[in-house]
């Protein structure tokens, strides 16, 4: 199909789709809804996005790339500072929750992956693995005595997933996040003390 008069950027579609998702939820909005919102024909939309999954993947990829860039930029800006575990956790949870404050979309993707949407699952896992590697790099800086940064990164990812679910259920708690950070920092400090005594 030939492009119609106007060319669109990815952001034109993803921004409008996110607005619809926040109102209707990821399950209940359609490409027809998006075409109507953007005042374009369905044919024009299908030229850019043949399926809803293609659009959702672009939204997730955009957010994961933004998250990774923000996080890596922060690490690079502070690489010569003393990055404390407390400050590191503030950034990780803030960036993670910022990414998944679109919790309905996150749950939609998990649901589609569980239901057997292999292309969505494979791309989502690939993006998560990329984020996990970046988390591991940060953990090695902030938790110098951590002997299993991979497991710690995975734990952080599970926490962020859980926060996304609680956010979607309107059951998130800033106080609980602070308590959780305290537990993780205490674990790191105990390990540091044990390592010092062993030397």
Image: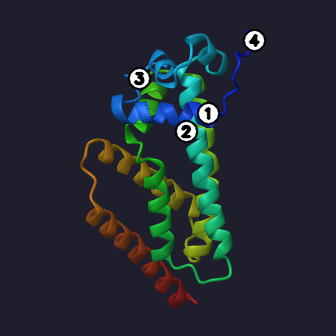
Q: According to the image, label 3 marks what residue?
A: 29
Q: Which structural element holds mark 3?
A: loop
Vertical arrangement, residue 114 with respect to residue 1, above or below? below
Q: Quadrant of the C terminus?
A: bottom right
Which residue carries the number 1 mark? 123
Measure how far apart labels 4 and 2 are at the Cα level: 27 Å
Marks 4 & 2, CB-CB < 8 Å contact: no
Q: Secondary structure at mark 2?
A: helix
Q: Which residue is mark 4?
A: 2
Residue at image coords 60%, 31%: 122
Q: Mark 4 vs mark 1: which is more N-terminal?
A: 4
Taking the spot 35% from the left edge, 28% from the top edge, the residue there is: 24
Question: Badges 1 and 2: C-beta atoms under 8 Å apart?
Answer: yes
Point 60% across, 40% down: residue: 61
Labels 3, 4: front one? 4
For the residue carrying disc 3, how many other residues have a C-alpha within 10 Å: few (<14), some (14-19), or many (20+)? Answer: some
Q: Would residue 2 appear left or right of 95 to someone viewing this image?
A: right
Distance (Cα) linking label 3 and label 2: 16 Å
> Disc 1 on helix, strand or loop?
helix
Q: Determine which residue is flagged by label 2.
A: 60
Screen quadrant of the N terminus: top right
State yes or no: discs 3 and 2 in contact (Cβ < 8 Å). Answer: no
Q: Residue furthest right?
A: 2
Q: Looking at the image, is mark 3 or mark 1 nearer the viewer?
A: 3
Q: Is residue 79 above or below residue 30?
A: below
Residue at (45, 76) in percent of width and height: 86
């Amino acid at each position: 199909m030939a492009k119609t008069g106007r060319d669109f950027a990815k952001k034109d579609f993803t921004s409008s789709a996110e607005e619809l998702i926040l109102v209707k939820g990821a399950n209940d909005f359609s490409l027809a809804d998006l075409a109507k919102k953007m005042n374009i024909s369905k044919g024009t939309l299908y030229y850019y996005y043949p399926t809803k999954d293609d659009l959702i993947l672009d939204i997730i990829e955009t957010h994961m790339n933004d998250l990774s860039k923000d996080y890596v930029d922060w690490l690079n800006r502070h690489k010569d500072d003393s990055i404390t575990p407390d400050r590191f956790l503030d950034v990780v949870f803030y960036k993670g929750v910022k990414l998944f404050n679109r919790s309905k979309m996150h749950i939609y993707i998990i649901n589609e992956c569980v239901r057997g949407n292999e292309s969505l699952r494979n791309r989502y896992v690939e993006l998560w693995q990329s984020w996990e590697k970046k988390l591991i790099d940060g953990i090695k800086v902030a938790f110098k005595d951590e002997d299993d940064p991979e497991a710690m990164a995975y734990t952080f990812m599970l926490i962020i997933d859980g926060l996304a679910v609680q956010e979607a259920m309107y059951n998130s708690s800033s106080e609980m996040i602070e308590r959780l950070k305290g537990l993780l920092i205490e674990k790191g400090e105990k390990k540091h003390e044990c390592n010092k005594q062993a030397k």
